[in-house]
Every structure is written in structure tokens, then in C-alpha cells.
Amino acid sequence: MEAHPANLPAPTASRAGLRLPGIGTGIGGGMVMLYLSVIVLLPLAAVASEAFSGGLGHFWEQVTSPLAVKSLKLTVVCSLIVVVLNGIFGTILAWLLVRDEFPGKSLINAVIDLPFALPTIVASLVLLTLYGTDSPLGIDIASTRAAVVVALMFVTLPFVVRAVQPLLLEMDREMEAAAASLGAGNFTIFRRIIFPNLLPGLGAGIALAFARALGEFGSVLLFAGGLPDTTVTSVFIRNQVESNNLVGASAVSMVLLVASLLLLGCVSLIQRWAIRHDRSSSEFIPTLAKDVSGDGGGI
Amino acid sequence: MSANPASRWSLRILGLGYLTLLLLIPLVMIFYKTFEDGIGPPLDAVTSPDGLHALKLSLLMVAISVPLNTIFGVGCALLLVRHKTRLNPVIDAVINLPFAVSPVVIGLSLFLLYGTGGWFAFIGEEGFKILFAVPGMVLASIFVSLPFVVRETVPVLQEIGTDQEQAASTLGANGWQTFRKITLPSIRWGVAYGVVLTTARVLGEFGAVTIVSGSISGQTQTLPLFVEKQYQNFNSTGAYGASLVLALLALITLFAMNLLKRKEDA
């Protein structure tokens, strides 16, 4: 749970073989698989089956239909912009939370997780009020592509911050001091020392944010709307369901699903790579759940 | 790296400015817009029959999904950490799926499975309505919030090790006693953290539930669906009233998260 792995006792080697209630290994494993099958696997299998129910040709036809391609392009481009922006600002925020001192810091640290806790439809509504036609700030971007970007920025904000923060906390300050004593300037220290050390966390955070952005629905819905130019893939899928084109909806869903799985695969590759290279004291890349739930460093 | 004052201040302005525009102003905005015309209109909207029904239904989702996912989550975490079986890598991968799938796709998947022509369509034909009814919405809520308790419990179980559990069983405790007296007290804050996240996710879920529920006012509308419907009916005060309730619940969630994190550190 907590981001100070150095303080943790090493996992005991002899953990196998202890019997715990209800988990006679075979029965327990069977029950877990049954639950997962009913809740997760069978429904997703139904999507795959529906997507290919008209054959591979029909599947391809649906995925490459002009509107589907348009929504996929919009979603990927907006998500890319968002992860670059959140990569930069997320790293800055993590740096401020770890290395800087200012009044209200612990409050800011807590508020970072708000997008994980606030329902997406509420986010959409409030962003629409703030940056819509009646904007008190005079910025009206409702129903534009910019609105898609801002909505996705909101929901993916915590990912990079929470992935980079523990790395910064654990980073050995002596390396920086050594570099400085050898005459390196701040920019050089950042580029040669800090950035390479943050890279695994940054990569994992960006991949998670990207996966989240690809599938995001609620926050985009009211703010960016469903105009032809602002229909992201999830809204496109919803529209297909409503117009009863279930094969089309399923086909595009499969594309999203595979893309997200590849991204999550990247995250676990980064984790394994980081553990193998032992860039820091121990397993410091937050697990998926820590990222999604926003488990921050103990500040 | 000891940043000079100029770069320190520019980083502060950049980072905090970003946060203010993206998070802080919107948060304040919810409160401001709700009470713009006084406390009456939003209160009326939230306490209208449909509003109250939506609130009740949201709480019902929590009351069913959270306990189920908590029991499953703890059991699954015990299996993953304490018993090395061949199924473990598969289970581990499947657990993460709900994070990878768009809520809309989750809704669609249930729609296909239980809808006309679906593999489980027979359940509905037997008279037990799943789609456009509470059971379908519960299934969607369980799906989206499945990983949290598992993911929060696994690392804690790894950290505590098995020394105490082994000591207990050496002294004659059976499996259930060991779990209740030793394991559970050690993992409680991790489990509690997972429960908080599960609850928040279930309360806020929109995409998956919107597809399986049909969003019928006073029948299959949870609070987030109520927000959307109110907005579409040009009743923005109602939408904001319900949003405020959800935002307050989100703030309580944040508070609980921070509290539990501190408990775990202690």
C-alpha cells in the first residue's frame, strides 16, 4: 500500500502451504474463476462473438466505416495530446508536492485524487458550465475538440502525478548533489539525473492515462457533446447501440479493448523492466490499482 | 537540484495554475451553481420523488455490489498471495480487465449477454428481468468496481508475511480462527481502502449503467443518470442539486482515503 518499500519487511520465503478458510486451493480457485467468468469473461466473450458474428469481412467493414474511423482518430489524437500535457504538468505537480514547500500543500495533495472520486457526469456538467456558452471566464469551448481534450485532461490528471511522486520521494538526492558539485546546471541535472530516474513511472502513468482516455465516456458526454466532429469512440459505440447496430458497436468495442489491453501490457512490461533493473530501492512502480486509486506518496 | 527562486516560482505558477483551472475552480463551481438561486430549488429537485428514488437506487447499488466485491476481493487476494496455483496468472490478468474496458463496452457486453438472442436471454424470458432493471445495473456496478479490493489487499498481504499466521496455526488455531484473529486485523486498513474506492466507483458509475438501465425516471435511474436527465430537461438547478450530493460524497471519499492512508502508515 504505502510508498516506502524500504521500510517494509521482506516477504517471507515460506508463505506457501498455509491453509486459510474457504480456500481449499482447488475450491477457492474454482470459485474465484466462476465469479470472474460470470461477471467479466462471459460478457466480454459475448462482445467478441457479436463482433465477428457476420464474419471477418463484416467486422472489418464496421471498423473501417467512415464514422467509426473518424471517432477512432479523434479519440486517439485527443488522448495523445492529453497524455503529453498531463505528462508535463503531472511531473511538475509531483515535483511541487515532493520537493517544494508551500501553504496548503497537503490539501493540494489530497485534491489531486478528486477526478478518481468525482462522478464523470458531474465533471462533464461542471466543465460545461465553466468553459461553455455561459462561461464566467469568457472561454467557450463547449462541443469542440478542445472540450474533448479538457475533459480527458480532467479525468486522467492523477495518473502521472501518482506514478511519478513515489519515485521522486525515493530518489537519492546525493546523485544530484554530486552532479551539482561537478558543475552541472539545473537543466543538465534534470535531463541527465532526474528525468531518467522518473522515466519508468512517467511511462507507466502515461500508459494508464492513455488507456483511461481511450474509453472515457461520461466526462465527454455533456461537455463535448455528440456532434459529428466531437464524437469520441465510446459515444460512437453508445450511438450504435441506440440505433441497434450491435455488430458495429461490438466491432469498434473490440478495437478499443485490444488497444487498452496492449497499453496495460506495456505497463506491466515497464514494471518488470524497472524491477529487473532495480532503479530504486525496490518495487517502486505503483501497481495498477494504486495508480487508478491514486495511492500517493506519504507526504 | 536546488531550483533558483525564478524557476521555483514559474514551476509553482504552472503546476498550481493548471490545477486551479482544471480542478479547484470546477469544484467551487459546483457549490456556487447549486446555491445560485438559494437553497430551495436544488433541495426541491433532490427531494422530488424521482430524485429521492435515484438516491435510494444508488445506495442500493452500493449495498449489493460493495459487500460482494469485498468478500470476493479478500478471498481472491488470499488465493493470489498465499496459494500458488496454475490459475493465478490468469486470475491476475482477468482482475485488471475492468480497468482496461470502457464503461460503455461493459454496458454493451451485459446488453448482449442478457438481451434478446444473448446466451443468457433465457433468464429474462423466465420472467426475471435483468436488462432495464435493477439486476442488470447491479451486474454493471460489480463489473466496473471489481478490481479495487483485490488490488489494495494483495500488497498488504505480501507485506505482513506469514510468520504470525504460522505461529497461530502451530498453537492450534484452525484456518478460520487464524484468518479472523490474525490475518483480518492486519489487512483491515488495506481492505477498507479498497472498500472506499469500490463505493466511490459504484456511486459515480455512469457509462455502463446508462446502457443497461434505459434510464427510466423513478425506476432505473441512479443519481448520475438523474443528473444527465435533469440537464437534458433544461433543469440545470436539479442537475446541480444532484451533482452537489455526488460531489459531497466524493469529498467524503477523498477524506476517507487520506485517513486510511495515514492509518496504514502508522
Image (cartoon, coloured by chain):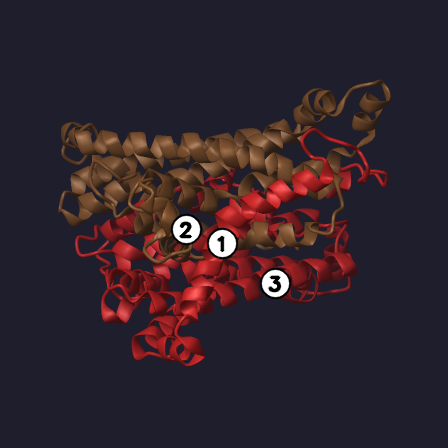
Q: Colour of chain A?
A: red
Chain shown brown: that is B
Q: Secondary structure at mark 1?
A: helix
Q: Give percent across and percent down for residue B29.
A: 27, 42
Q: Which mark is residue A135?
A: none
Do labels 2 and 3 touch, CB within 8 Å? no
- The image shows residue A54, relative to residue B11, as above or below, that is below
> Looking at the image, which is closer to me, B19 or A41?
A41
Q: Which residue sits at x=17%, y=53%?
A: A134
> Looking at the image, which is closer to me, B179 or A219?
B179
Q: Which residue is mark 2?
A: B120
Residues at marks 1 and 2, CA–CA distance in whole angstroms: 10 Å
Tell me the subunit letter for badge 1: A
**Three-letter amino acid code of the residue under disc 2:** Phe
Q: Which residue is mark 1?
A: A42
Sequence-first tag of 1 and 3? 1
**Three-letter amino acid code of the residue under disc 3:** Gly
Instruction: Determine whether, in the image, residue A15 is placed left or right of residue A20.
Output: right
